[in-house]
């Protein structure tokens, strides 16, 4: 840390320290205080805050064009992904923006050694005391408290820049972002739920049972036990992947980002492998810590989200190499007024790190997200652009669609809590970000055999208020909207928005090992790593055949080839209630509950091995 409060005081007292005329500043961004947050205290002047300054990416539209061309199976460039360097060249800011921002930083006494730049120089990061940031942005930071959870953040509700700098800066955070990164896991079944606990305790018998009892689902014969507990074997049967074995020297790779101190325990993983994937025993994953992220192996610290993610993603895709990232989500503060529990946006820290690497996992599943409205639009657009960069490089990104239906999982109009953050407190469905980003694949949840939309929680789904509907899903989504009754949920959602989820997978009653004990768990946190596991297998098939990886999946998933082949199992029963409504219904074709449906690996494999 080069800049201290002492430096700040000295600088402010010095006539040689020139702060631009306050009158030249104009508000760049302003938000209303989000519902559920209250001002707790003034932010300590000497509290260090790490500001990320995003410069414009003037050629992003060119990058987007590349992304769609290399991701469209009907395009001649399909699979011709860009290199890291080619992507960085496309998203680099103009020299005028670099000069303007450099001059502004210099006017505040910052030197090049105080700055951390992204490889493309489209982000500049500085760590400064709050009082220093307040002077730079002509603002006032406070400690804000989330009344329901007790979480605290150092944030402001508006910030300013010199007028001439506005066109050279897209975003600066943390300023106005009140998002609360949360896992999409729904329920861990403990011993106080007798019926479900019995399912977990006796599931080993189901795993090993050879009674011959089967149920027909998705055109496959599936063990009857899969209607009550989900295992690796169940998923292989349900999704037509029985008998497929990746090459031992496979070039496919799979990654799982972890946050919120969710530690992936290797002993739990081995217990899981011993029961459900004995051929994977003694295999493990590569661990990468970001921003001080750790993965301690004390069994008592094993995290449910991490266990679910790594056990099923790596269990389904074995022997494909796996990577687990842990991004430090909370600074090492003491929990008092002067030391807020969170000052950063962890998934963007992860994104920064991965974009800077030459080689990344080809398949990545993330089980975390925020209410879209708590993420400032400017910041959501920039984060989404980062996901597009990975897609252009050949990476398939999957995100859980959330476990709150169309907003809060509550169908009761009297007690629902879906209100806008624009100061009007209008009832409105609440989309989930990053699932609402058009450059990622959003995964909803199903349950049972045969499959229906998950009912113990609401499969997250709906329409973005930030991002327009992309062309690849236009026809499929419009067909669904056209079939709705006139003025159905009028004013509650954006008909023209990016619709999600894109696809789905089983999302309840997964059997995992946690802290040495078998447990039953549910959530779209299960659905996303499951779908990702099958994508990693598809990549193995393509790479083994000398073809490039799949990359951004959505143009393929919405393609006529997939529809004609019936390569996605259409889910037509269930709904996702919330916001005082029954939510949307699952129906024939795409719907905002289960998307296009669940995967048929065998048919998808045949499609991706064609002449693409």
Image: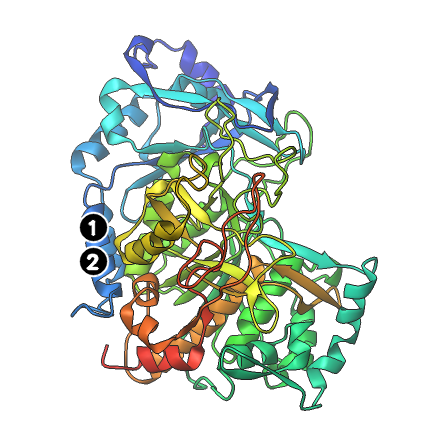
SS at badge 2: helix
Residue appearing at x 38%, y 32% in the figure? 172
Q: Are marks 2 and 1 in contact (CB under 8 Å)?
A: yes
Residue 45 coordinates in the image, percent (x, y): 54, 20
Q: Specify the quadrant that holds the C terminus.
A: bottom left
Quick check: 269 above or below 433? below
Neighbour class for label 2 at 10 Å: few (<14), some, many (≥20)? many
Relative horizontal placement of residue 507, taking residue 355 as reference (left or right): right
Residue holding disc 2: 66
Q: Is residue 246 above or below residue 386?
A: below
Residue on which the image places disc 1 = 90
Q: CA distance from mark 2 to mark 1?
A: 10 Å
* Badge 1: residue crowd in 10 Å (few <14, some 14–19, many ≥20): some
| Among the 4 quarters of the image, the one containing residue 154 | top right
Residue 571 point in image, percent of width and height: 49, 66
Front label number (2 vs 1): 2
Judged left or right of residue 161, residue 343 is right
For residue 305, the mark is none
Q: At 32% across and 64% down in the image, what residue appears?
A: 558
């Amino acid at each position: 840390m080069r800049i201290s409060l002492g430096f700040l005081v000295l600088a402010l007292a010095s006539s040689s320290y020139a702060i631009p005329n306050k009158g030249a500043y104009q508000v760049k961004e302003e938000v209303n205080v989000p519902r559920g947050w209250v001002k707790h205290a003034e932010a300590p002047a000497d509290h260090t805050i790490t500001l990320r300054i995003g410069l414009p990416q003037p050629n992003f539209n060119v990058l987007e064009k590349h992304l769609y061309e290399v991701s469209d199976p009907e395009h001649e460039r399909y699979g011709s992904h860009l290199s890291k360097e080619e992507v960085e060249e496309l998203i680099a800011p103009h020299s005028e923006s670099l000069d303007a921002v450099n001059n502004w930083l210099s006017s505040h006494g910052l030197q090049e050694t105080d700055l951390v730049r992204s490889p493309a120089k489209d982000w500049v990061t500085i760590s400064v005391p709050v009082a220093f940031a307040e002077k730079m942005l002509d603002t006032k930071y406070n400690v804000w408290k989330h009344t329901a959870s007790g979480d605290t953040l150092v944030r402001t509700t508006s910030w300013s820049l010199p007028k001439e700098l506005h066109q050279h800066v897209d975003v600066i955070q943390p300023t106005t972002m009140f998002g609360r990164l949360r896992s999409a896991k729904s329920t861990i079944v403990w011993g106080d739920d007798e019926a479900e606990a019995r399912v977990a305790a006796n599931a080993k018998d189901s795993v090993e049972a050879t009674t011959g009892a089967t149920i027909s689902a998705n055109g496959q014969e599936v063990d009857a036990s899969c209607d009550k507990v989900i295992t690796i074997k169940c998923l292989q049967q349900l999704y037509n992947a029985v008998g497929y074995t990746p090459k031992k020297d496979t070039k496919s790779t799979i990654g799982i980002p972890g946050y919120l101190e969710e530690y992936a325990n290797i002993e739990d993983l081995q217990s899981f492998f011993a029961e459900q994937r004995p051929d994977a025993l003694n295999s493990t994953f590569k661990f990468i810590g970001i921003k001080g992220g750790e993965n301690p192996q004390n069994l008592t610290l094993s995290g449910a989200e991490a266990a679910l993610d790594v056990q099923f993603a790596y269990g389904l895709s074995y022997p494909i190499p796996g990577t687990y990232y842990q991004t430090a989500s909370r600074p090492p503060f003491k929990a008092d007024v002067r030391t807020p529990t969170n000052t950063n946006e962890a998934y963007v820290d992860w994104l920064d790190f991965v974009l800077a690497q030459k080689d990344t996992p080809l398949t990545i599943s993330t089980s975390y997200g925020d209410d879209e409205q708590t993420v400032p639009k400017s910041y959501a657009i920039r984060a989404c652009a980062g996901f597009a960069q990975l897609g252009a490089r050949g990476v398939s990104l999957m995100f859980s669609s959330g476990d709150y239906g169309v907003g809060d999982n509550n169908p009761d109009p009297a007690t629902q809590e879906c209100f806008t953050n624009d100061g009007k407190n209008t009832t409105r469905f609440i989309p989930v970000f990053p699932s609402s980003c058009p450059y990622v694949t959003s995964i909803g949840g199903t349950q049972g055999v045969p499959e229906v939309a998950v009912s113990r929680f609401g499969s997250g789904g709906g329409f973005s208020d930030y991002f327009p509907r992309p062309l690849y899903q236009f026809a499929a989504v419009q067909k669904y909207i056209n079939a709705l009754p006139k003025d159905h949920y009028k004013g509650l959602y954006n008909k023209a928005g990016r619709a999600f989820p894109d696809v789905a997978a089983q999302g309840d009653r997964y059997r995992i090992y946690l802290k040495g004990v078998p447990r039953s768990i549910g959530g779209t946190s299960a659905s996303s790593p499951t779908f990702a596991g099958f994508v990693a297998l598809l990549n193995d098939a393509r790479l083994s055949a000398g073809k490039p990886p799949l990359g951004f999946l959505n143009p393929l998933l919405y393609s006529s080839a997939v529809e004609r082949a019936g390569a996605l199992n259409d889910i037509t029963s269930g709904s996702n209630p919330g916001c005082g409504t029954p939510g949307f219904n699952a129906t024939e074709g795409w719907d905002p509950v289960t998307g296009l449906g669940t995967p048929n690996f065998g048919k998808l494999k045949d499609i991706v091995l064609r002449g693409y």
